[in-house]
Image (spheres, grey):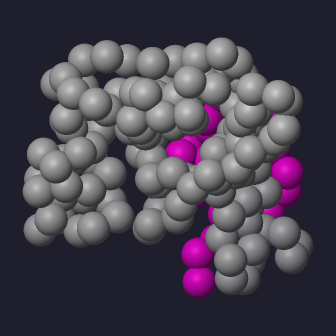
Amino acid sequence: METYPGRVQISDRLEPAVVEFLSSGTRTGHLSYLAGDGRPLVTPVWFVVDDGALVFATGRDTSKARMLRRDPRVSIGVDLQEPPYAFAQVQGVAEFVDDPDYLLKVCTACGVRYMGADRGEEFGRRNAVPEETVVRLRPTRVLFDGDVTA
């Protein structure tokens, strides 16, 4: 059983215990953002932690990317669905990075994380195409509870 600090922590950055939690296993992030008419939307994302930010790739011309450009305030929630039932919520600002080398790095890291080391490079090459872009969630507020049952 995984264990993390068992109290709610509030910070403006990713503390080491939060990075460990977010980086463990193949937990999917749940990205929350606003539609053009103000409706809240949630979508799953594969992500990695890189230099203090949550990072993922998305299609540059998707409705998600358009909405993030219009209003970059977002949140990603990640949870552990078995005891000790932990969660992290990272609120922040979405920033786009249009760098093909960085896109390949992020897509490969996500491929390794979610598909395994033997297929990471394959997924990186498949997804690091000109139609994709990198989104970095720069944290402004982080909530973390490493043991909801405590």
Of 31 and 150, nearer the camera is 31
Inspect this view and state whether residue 88 appears: yes
Query: What is the x, y in percent for residue 64?
Result: 57, 35
Location of the N terminus (image quadrant)? bottom right
Q: Residue at x 79, y 57 (%)?
A: 145
Q: Quadrant of residue 6?
A: bottom right
Whether residue 94 is situated above or below residue 115 in the rendered picture? above
Q: Which residues are magenta?
A: 1-21
Whether residue 75 is situated above or below residue 124 in the rendered picture? above
Whether residue 88 is situated above or below residue 63 in the rendered picture? below
Of 81 and 103, nearer the camera is 103
- Asked if the stretch drawn in magenta spans residue 123, the answer is no
Q: Quadrant of residue 57?
A: top left
Inspect this view and state whether residue 11 appears: no
Query: What is the x, y in percent for residue 149?
Result: 86, 76
- Asked if the stretch drawn in magenta spans residue 3, the answer is yes
Q: Residue at x 44, y 66 (%)?
A: 26
Q: Residue at x 39, y 35 (%)?
A: 59
Query: What is the x, y in percent for residue 110?
Result: 32, 51
